[in-house]
Amino acid sequence: MPKPVLGYWEVRGLTEPIRYLLHYKNVDFEDKRYQIADRAAWEKVKFTLDLDFPNLPYYIDGDVKLTQSVTILRYLAEKYGLDGKSPAEKLRVSLAEQQITDFRTSLGRVCYDPNFEKVKPEFVKKVPAQLKFVANFLGNRKFLAGDSLTYADFMAYEALDFYLYLIPNVLADFPALKEYHQRIRNLPELQKYLKSPQYQRWPLFSPHAQFGGSGPEPKQE
């Protein structure tokens, strides 16, 4: 059987948590990255892949052909046992998934706003309140679900990493979240990927973004 294929633009965007999961589980897959400057390459194959809803990202695993980043994550998490070990953990994972999606989406909305510099200060002021909810949800647990690593942790790591670019000291008042972010980053399987040529730290978004889409990579604290 051909190895699975993950297709997406050549940015971190929505897909990096999927890559984290695949590399964490040592899945041999083809990482197909399309150049944003050459949309024609994607349009040429878009309707030839037998996808129900042709879009990026997509994941093709034999007869399974999926789009939508969270759907792909859920499929892989269930396949590889990273969706929670008990009903209680699965419920926490589901809740975390939705909250993190909202948290990350709000950042993307600001970064793509044509009035980015104008709306950024008000947005930044509201971030600590959101982080407090996340910190309280994590509590003294090792991972969001409890003792078990799940796909929600890869989503949370990526969201926090994005915020650290926009607000370098964003975790200064949240030591538990800072330790959590580092805990995920320091997973041996993830470190192997993060230090490899396949990992692309920057850009976060497409060139249409007002922040995170072009220019030099900002420093994180």
Image: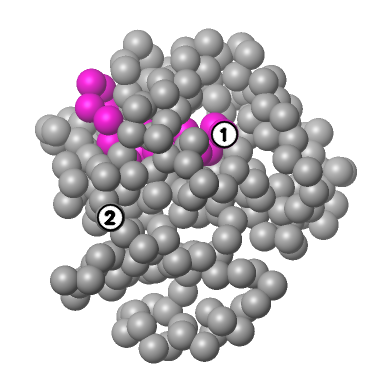
Query: Magenta residues, as a range?
Result: 145-161
The residue to which callout 2 is attached is 28
Residue 177, compared with residue 192, is above or below; it is above
Q: Quadrant of residue 71?
A: bottom left
Colour scheme of the rendered structure: one colour
Residue at point 46%, 83% (across, down): 46
| Left or right: where 175 falls relative to 126 | left
Residue 47 pos. (x, y %)? 42, 88
Which badge, 1 or 2, is on the more N-terminal residue? 2
The residue to which callout 1 is attached is 161
Helix, strand or loop at label 2? It is loop
- What mark, if any, has residue 129 been given in the picture? none
Residue 36 pos. (x, y %)? 64, 69
Residue 221, compared with residue 62, is above or below; it is above
Distance from Cα at disc 1 to Cα at disc 2: 25 Å
Residue 39 pos. (x, y %)? 62, 78
Q: Nearer the viewer, residue 36 or 196?
A: 196
Helix, strand or loop at label 1? It is helix
Mark 1 or 2: in front is 2
Amino acid on which the number 1 mark rests in the picture: Asp
Residue 68, compared with residue 22, is above or below; it is below
Question: In the image, is residue 151 part of the stretch drawn in magenta?
Answer: yes
